[in-house]
Image (tube, grey):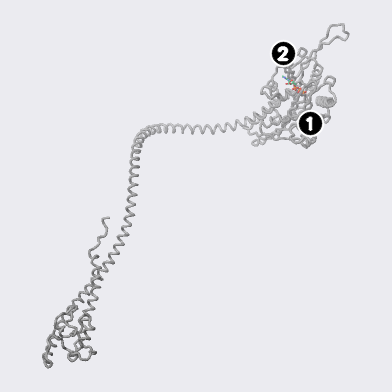
Amino acid sequence: MSRLPVISSKRVLAPSSSENLLDMAPLQKRMRREQEPHKPQAATTIVGYKRPAAAAAARAPPYRPIRGAGAATVAAGPSRGFVRPVAASTAPKAGSSKQPAGAKPGVTGATRRKPWDLKGKVNDMEGKIRNYQTKYRSVNEENEALKDSVAQNQTKVSELEQEVKGQKRKISEYEAQLQMLSGVQNQLEETRREKNVLQKELSNLEQKYKVMETLRDSQETELQTLKMKLSVQESTMTRLQATLRDREEEISSLKETVAEQRDELHAGEMERRRLHNTIQELKGNIRVFCRVRPLEDGGLSKHIQLAASDNKSILLAKTEESHTGKTAEMQKNYHFSFDRVFGPLASQQEIFDEISLLVQSALDGYNVCCFAYGQTGSGKTYTMEGEEVDDMRGVIPRAVQQIFRAGEKLSSQGWEFSFTVSVVEIYNETLRDLLYSGKASKRPDHEIRKTASNDVTVTNLTYQKVSTEDEVLGLIALAKQNRSTAQTALNDRSSRSHSVFQLQIEGVNAGRDIKCKSTLCLVDLAGSERMVKSQSQGERFKEMTFINSSLSNLGIVITSLANKESHIPYRNSKLTYLLQNCLGGNSKTLMFVNISPELNSFGETLNSLRFASKVNDCVIGTASSNKK
Ligand SMILES: Nc1ncnc2c1ncn2[C@@H]1O[C@H](COP(=O)(O)OP(=O)(O)OP(=O)(O)O)[C@@H](O)[C@H]1O
């Protein structure tokens, strides 16, 4: 700001100089005009010519520049400017060729010489000439001086013009600088504001810095402590690394041991299977368990007695009048022995514990079949399916649970299992798919077929692949819903059909290149009953006929097997045909004979026990594992 341009005093002078210059122009003009009349003129012209006074006076302006004035006017002596004429008659135009007639040239009127005084007149003229010459010289000098002055002034003017240009340039430069400086000033203001903000920030940061310093001090202290700890840890780590190396060596040796033990385990597993099978064989490939249902109010009726010493025999006693009627009442006892007899208080768990080894055999690759036989309402469905409540779950859900859990355990030994479920019912000698979920009108027909590998299959039957226990339980629930039930005089929800649940198990141990395949077959047979007692009529009678026929055919097949007959009449009924692989040589079979404790069921109970006893006496060929 302090550097604003200072305007020179010369700038003020410049216009006045040019004005002077302009003023000079008319002056020079005047001087030229004055010089022109002073050309030397012939004396004759001056002497011999006179202008008429009146005419001259009429045309002459009141003031006019001196141009070739008469001798009298020159004598008056004004060298420059305007000269007032002495008299109108004394202003003739010198040298003019158009003088009016009668004018006397060379007469001024001041001092009039005699016409004859030519010498005097010449002297006057010479005097005038001298005056003019002197004047001319002085005017010349003055003119020269003025020229010099003009030239000087022009130089000055051009210098001043240059200077003005330079000043203008400077001014525009200064103006540009000024603009720039005003921008700089704005920036400066902005910078000042920023500076204030930054100063505030700085003070904040300084405060923070102080806090950080305090923190740093405390952290340094902490760091020192940590360094000490670290050195301790490092020494511990070195020690641990050494230990780790030892452990790694131990682990690798343990891994080797584990591999060896796995082999041993596998060998053990194989041995277990063999021994397990031996035990099962010793127990008999077909076993019979008897289960007595409790009375409705609990307990056991008097005519059924279970031996306290063992859990294998059952006594059925009946008091009869003597035939003659004279003697006292006779008691007739019927003794039966089975692999196990379960009283009315036996829990579902106890029952399953006895057959769980058999279920294990199914995972080992043996066909296993378990079926419940007995009169209507004796507890077959309760034994096989049970109730929803955990404690009351029957053989089927418990067996499924065991299979899946054992399968998972065996997976650690390299076994992978796949499972397929099917549930079929035989109602009036017709097969029905209990897993069918389509329209009833489109229910397909089914036939039992034997494959080339001697497997029994049912055409159009749902064979559902499953991988979890829950999936199987869902299918069991569906089958239960579908099962034909009808009301009879003996049982509210009497199962009028044989229900066959089959779980096909396929195991692969890829590491050891072993495969096994088996079927766990769990059957809830339809209730056996005598026609008179059940008062069956019509449709119920037809159902009963089919049921009894298939059950008696089951008995015939079992007896034929026991007698090692060459022909086993499996095809006599759908039930025996479907179960032939489970009943025949290559299987482990368990039969539950369920009996009702009511006295009025005595006859049925006796029949059932006799049938079961016959089965129990059978020795079915040794089962072999389906291993490849
Ligand atoms: N061991 C038992 N303990 C308690 N209740 C039982 C037992 N066995 C059977 N029951 C009950 O007796 C009734 C008949 O049993 P269940 O339906 O199992 O007979 P069932 O032999 O299957 O008859 P059906 O041949 O007509 O189907 C059911 O209410 C069942 O709960």
Decide if residue 113 is on the left or right side of residue 299: left
- Residue 196: tell me if it is visible: yes
Q: What residue lies at 85% left-to-right and 26% top-to-bottom?
A: 538
Locate residue 241, reporting x and y percent: 46, 33
Query: Ligand 1 within 8 A of label 1's CB?
Result: no
Whether the residue carrying mark 2 lies under 8 Å from ligand 1 is answered with no
Q: Is residue 458 above or below residue 382?
A: below
Q: Is residue 272 found left or right of 484 in the rendered image?
A: left
Q: Considering only vertical position in the picture, is 155 above or below 564?
A: below
Question: Label 1 sits on what residue type?
Answer: Leu
* Cα separation between marks 2 and 1: 39 Å
Front one among 414 and 123: 123
- The numbered mark at residue 578 is 1
Badge 1 marks a residue whose secondary structure is helix
Quadrant of image for the N terminus: bottom left
Mark 2 or mark 1: whose residue is earlier in sequence: 2
User: Quick one: 607 or 307, which is closer to the camera?
Assistant: 607
- Residue 145 in picture, x, y percent from top left: 18, 76
Based on the displayed image, in which of its 4 quarters is residue 426 positioned? Answer: top right
Residue 556 visible, this angle: no
Q: Residues within 10 Å of mark 2 (few under 14, many from 20)?
A: few
Q: Which mark is residue 309?
A: 2
- Describe the element under mark 2 as helix, strand or loop: loop
Question: In front of the other: label 2 or label 1?
Answer: 1
Q: Quadrant of ligand 1?
A: top right
Q: Residue at x 47, y 31 (%)?
A: 243
